[in-house]
Amino acid sequence: MAAVTLEKVKVLLKREEERCVRERAKSKALFEEAKKNLVGGVPMSWMRIWTGGFPVFVDRAEGVYITDADGHRYLDLCLGDTGGLCGHAHPRITEAIYEQIKNRGTTTMLPTEDSIWVGKELERRFKLPCWQILMTATDANRMALKAAREYTGRRLILAFNGTYHGSVDETLCVNIMGYLINAPGLMGPIVEDPSVMTRMIEFNDVDALNTAAHHPSRDPADTFWLEDGRLLRTQTSAVQIRVMQSRKPPVRIINPGRCYRRDTIDATHAANFHQIEGLLVDLVPFGDAFVARELEWLNGPMREWWGLDGLLTGSRLAHLREEGQSRPGSRERLVRFGIRAKDGRPIGVFSLMGIDMTHRRAEVDAGIGDPDYWGGGYGSDAMLLITAYAFDWLDLRRLWLRTRDDNLRAQRQVEKCGYTREAVWRHLVHFGVRHHAMLSYGLLREE
């Protein structure tokens, strides 16, 4: 069997396209005529997406078949995107439409008695009591999104990658190699960065569709779900969270427990195993040891998440710190803590900034600077400590923080610690090759 090469495919494709054009000369002539008055030569722009560079022009349609201007007959699997679901030119439908136009008129912009019957029939068939009638699927999608946003208070939508959802701007984007971009050729997009209003998942990815992006079951170690909606724990870190919420630092615990993961069984993996972990967490004053490491972190792997494009020198960092301390009241408005591992090694910094004792609020700024300790729970533990310090010792009532829209690790961390997303500041910062939104999270003491 001869090998299939790209060059051979191109030759065959060119031959078939030329045959398609040759056998549909009348449709091509109609297309050229239509371009004089219709944008793109078609009533609706998507009709141009057709083999040969132009669409076939329909002469007539009956039942499930359409016939083009050149006499070719096609089995119609679209049926007007369900508008012709009962078939084209169905006798009973055409008679009913004819009687309506002849005896009762159309487009009065007012309800008729028939609309009451339609509403009742829709309820009978689909078991939903209330309905609104719109003329297109696009309008229906837009209205559904408006209603959902009004009811839930949420703004982001979830769409399938590479599929068509009508001319709804939030869905006219594609995920290419992990980057969400507006669909090529899209006219007048609402936003330059579609990620501020859309999340995209692959078609038929049921797990991604049914489970929130930050949920543990979306992690590489899939979890076991029970029929009542609970899931078996994949690790014992949940105990750490409960301890941190109920005790004041310093915290020292040993936490054994049985865990379950959907791992392939081999010499180092098992579906059921026991895990033992210890926790030693404390916040310490931000001293010289942390000052020396902070510059290394700011110019290292954490530079991207903190949005620093240029190299930060020691003198510039010292100047910025002195400038901040020189502002009136700044020493009372800023509290900084260092985070260290059990061996005393500095690994990160947590701060309370803009402490307002009148309104009892402050902004949290945090970061584990040492990449060796990323993903180990240190950030979550320290976040709970700084939160407890702010609420229990400083008697604050509200904390808030910001993170970039692409910093998924930070989003998971703060949501796990109880913070709620409150706002999206679109195109607030520019880093790398595009603008990014900043997500604002907040937490009230009573929460």
Image (cartoon, grey):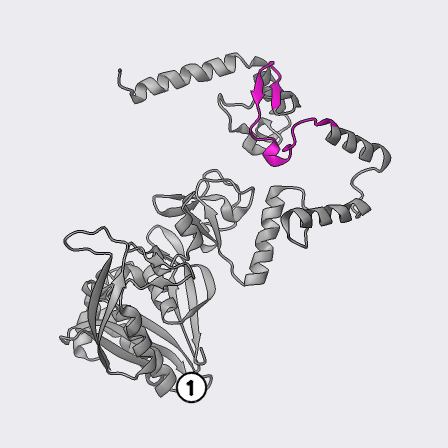
Q: Is residue 331 above or below residue 239?
A: below
Q: Position of residue 310 (x, y in %)?
A: 27, 59
Res 241 visible: yes
Res 285 visible: no
* 78 or 24: nearer the viewer: 78
Kind of residue at disc 1? Met
Image quarter of residue 309:
bottom left
Q: Is residue 97 above or below residue 375?
A: above
Figure label count: 1
* 339 or 143: nearer the viewer: 143
Does the stretch in magenta take in 292?
no
Location of mark 1 (residue): 357
* 69 or 447: nearer the viewer: 447
Q: Position of residue 364 (x, y in %)?
A: 36, 74
* 31 or 139: nearer the viewer: 139
Image quarter of residue 350:
bottom left
Secondary structure beneath disc 1? Answer: loop
Q: Is residue 152 above or below residue 180?
A: below
Residue at x 26% of width, y 15% of height: 2
Q: Is residue 189 above or below residue 416?
A: above
Magenta-highlighted residues: 65-91
Q: Position of residue 265 (x, y in %)?
A: 20, 52
Residue at far front of view = 227
**What is the quadrant of the C terminus in the image?**
bottom left
Residue at x 33% of width, y 57% of height: 224
Q: Position of residue 280 (x, y in %)?
A: 20, 77
Check disc 1: other Cα within 10 Å, few if <14, some if 14-19, many if 20+: some
Does the stretch in magenta take in 75?
yes
**What is the quadrant of the N terminus in the image?**
top left
